[in-house]
Amino acid sequence: MNQFAESEKETVLLNANNLAESAVNTITFFQTLPMEYRHLVLEQLRDLGGSRFFVSLNSEKIIINPIEDSPLKAQVIAVVDEALKRRIPSTNQIAIAFSHPDDLHVLKNDVLLKDLPPSWGAYSLIIPSVKPPVLVVQVEMTDHEWLYLAAILPPPYLLIDKSIISSEQVITLMFTTVLLLIFIYLLFYWQTKPLKQLAMAVSEMSIDLRQQPLKEEGATEIIAATSAFNRMQQKLQSYIRDREVLFRSISHDLKTPITRLRLRSELLDNEKQTVAFNHDLDDLEMLVKGALQTVKDTDIHENIQPVDMLKLLNRISSPQPDTIQIISNEVQPYRGKPLALKRALANLIENGVKYGDSVVITVVDSPDSLKITIEDNGPGIPEKELHGIFTPYRRLHNDKQGYGLGLGISRSIIQAHNGELQLLNRQQGGLEVIIILPRVYKSQH
């Protein structure tokens, strides 16, 4: 780019030198003419052409409004001045300037070229559309007589057009750029919308496996990914459905032989064996009922919707207002399955009240997650049992209520919401339950 600019500058200076030589010839020609013939020659030049200059003999020096100064302008004037002074006697005054075409004064100081008839400049000053600067050379011939020469330098025009593009081109470029950006945004939005829907469906699949298949649209790659996701979801739905039907059938069908065995045990003559038999049947029946409860409590066939967590917690604690305290600031709605969340939180809160007499619930909301802490004053859980307490039928106390499934069901529901459930023993005694629910669905409204 720099080499190209330097080459153009050299061309401008060479053209200026050639124009200066032509000006010298014209000035010398008029100096050799008798004074009475000079105006006749001017009329012939104006009518017939023959000069590259607009030539006039003026009674006064014309004041030129110069164009903006620039290093190249100064170099061009220096080249012209040097060529004129080399061949014109030093007794003659010489004035060299560049004028804008629309502000070019000719003949008199109050006359502009654009106000003259077109024929006056038809042969010499044909102004291109880019309107380059006009070189004006004035030489004093005698007292009150100035020879006026005006000409346009051959292209390239680099004296006043410093900017790479004109203001009109800048406006056009900006308008085109805005239109292009709007088009790119709309195209990008159209292409990424199905991708966002796919990402949202993948995030929600863990909690809502039965969501509707996605519409296959967008770019070819996005359509292929969406189609693969829909097929995978259909296979998982079929697998889960078959598993639930099989599990329910087995659990339900086991009730009949258990009842039959219990009746037959009563016919045994040995009372000791009857008691042992019934004890084993009680354990087996507890396992069957627990299995059915697990399927029922984790079968969260609900639509995802905004859930008012404070309202949900108040509803859970309403039967026991004296034993449950809720501490919270403002909480934004959380997108999840309300009945499932109520089931999970109710299990955890009831355990805290059952073993710790009272609980304190603290809710902390943030843009990325919702944190719920449940603290009680109970005996806590032995450190070695913290990791195994979620195992089905695992109970640390000898109470006959429940099957030891509540914690496991609560953790399954929270994990289905992409959350975490942690159990910690408090230093001052009691158990601390920490629930962290990420707001992975916050962008969907």
Image (tube, rainbow, N blue to C red):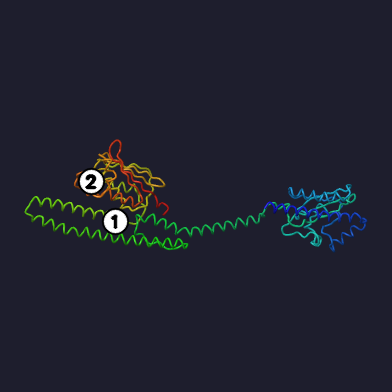
Pointer 1 local density, CA inside 10 Å: few below 14, some 14–19, many at least 20: few
Gap between marks 2 and 1 measured at Cα: 23 Å
Residue at position x 74%, y 57% in the image: 155
User: Would you say residue 108 is visible in this rendering?
Assistant: yes
Pointer 1 residue: 299
Secondary structure at badge 2 equals loop
Residue at image point 57% right, 56% down: 178
User: At 27% across and 53% down in the image, what residue appears?
Assistant: 297
The amino acid at mark 2 is: Arg
- Residue 60 screen position, x and y as percent: 85, 50
The percent position of residue 66, horizontal first and vertical second, equals 76, 49
Quadrant containing the C terminus in the rendered view: bottom left
Query: In this orientation, which residue lies closer to the viewer: 326 or 350?
Result: 350
Q: Secondary structure at mark 1?
A: loop
| Callout 2–callout 1 Cβ contact below 8 Å | no
Question: Which of the labelled discs sits on residue 395, or is there none?
Answer: 2
Q: Is residue 291 above or below residue 363?
A: below
How packed is label 2: few (under 14 Cα within 10 Å), some, or many (20 or more)? some
Q: Is residue 317 visible?
A: no
- Which residue ends up furthest to the top in the rendered image? 428
In this rendering, which labeled residue sits more in front, label 2 or label 1?
Answer: 2
Q: Amino acid at mark 1?
A: Asp
**In the rendering, at what x and y percent does residue 353 appear?**
25, 43
Q: Which of the 4 quarters of the picture holds residue 382?
A: top left
